[in-house]
Image (spheres, rainbow, N blue to C red):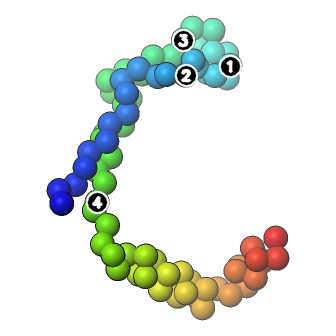
Amino acid sequence: MPPTTARMPDTPSDPPSSAAQSVTGGLPVQPSASTTSPPVTLQPLRWSDPFRWLALGLRDLRAAPGIAVFYGLC
């Protein structure tokens, strides 16, 4: 399956936040062509990927068990 490309809309659907308005003097902020992000390329997943993620998590747990205990208690 070829990678899928997702693009964000060119115009924001939400109005700018009050923090953005205070920085720009109350004027709405419009993204310019130079500030837009490149499109995100999604990679296809294999059936074995979740098992690989679990194995990597187990490796992290063995490397730093104290962090896992801390977050488990929280």
Comparing marks 3 and 4, which lies closer to the viewer?
A: 4
Numbered label attached to residue 43: 4
Numbered label attached to residue 33: none
Is 40 on the left or on the right of 52, as rendered? left
Give the residue at x 45% y 16%: 30
Outermost residue on the left side: it is 2
Q: What residue type is labelled 2?
A: Asp
Q: What residue type is labelled 4?
A: Gln
Quarter-wise, where is residue 9 in the image? top left
Outermost residue on the front side: it is 47
Task: State which tag comes first along the sequence, 4 or 2.
Answer: 2
Q: In which quarter of the image is the C terminus?
A: bottom right
Mark 1 highlights which residue? 18
Could you say where residue 15 lies in the image, as x and y percent from the top left? 57, 18
Tell me the CA gap for discs 2 and 1. Answer: 12 Å
Kindly check if marks 4 and 2 are in contact, taking CB atoms under 8 A apart as contact.
Answer: no
Is the residue marked by circle 2 packed among few (<14), some (14-19), or many (20+) residues within 10 Å? few
Say whether residue 5 is visible.
yes
Tell me the CA gap for discs 1 and 4. Answer: 36 Å
Give the residue at x 60% y 91%: 62
Tell me the CA gap for discs 1 and 3. Answer: 10 Å
Kindly check if marks 3 and 4 are in contact, taking CB atoms under 8 A apart as contact.
Answer: no
Total marks shown come to 4
Mark 2 highlights which residue? 14
Tell me the CA gap for discs 3 and 4. Answer: 35 Å
Dot 1: element: helix
Is the residue marked by circle 3 packed among few (<14), some (14-19), or many (20+) residues within 10 Å? some
Viewer-proximal residue, 73 or 64? 73
Kindly check if marks 1 and 4 are in contact, taking CB atoms under 8 A apart as contact.
Answer: no
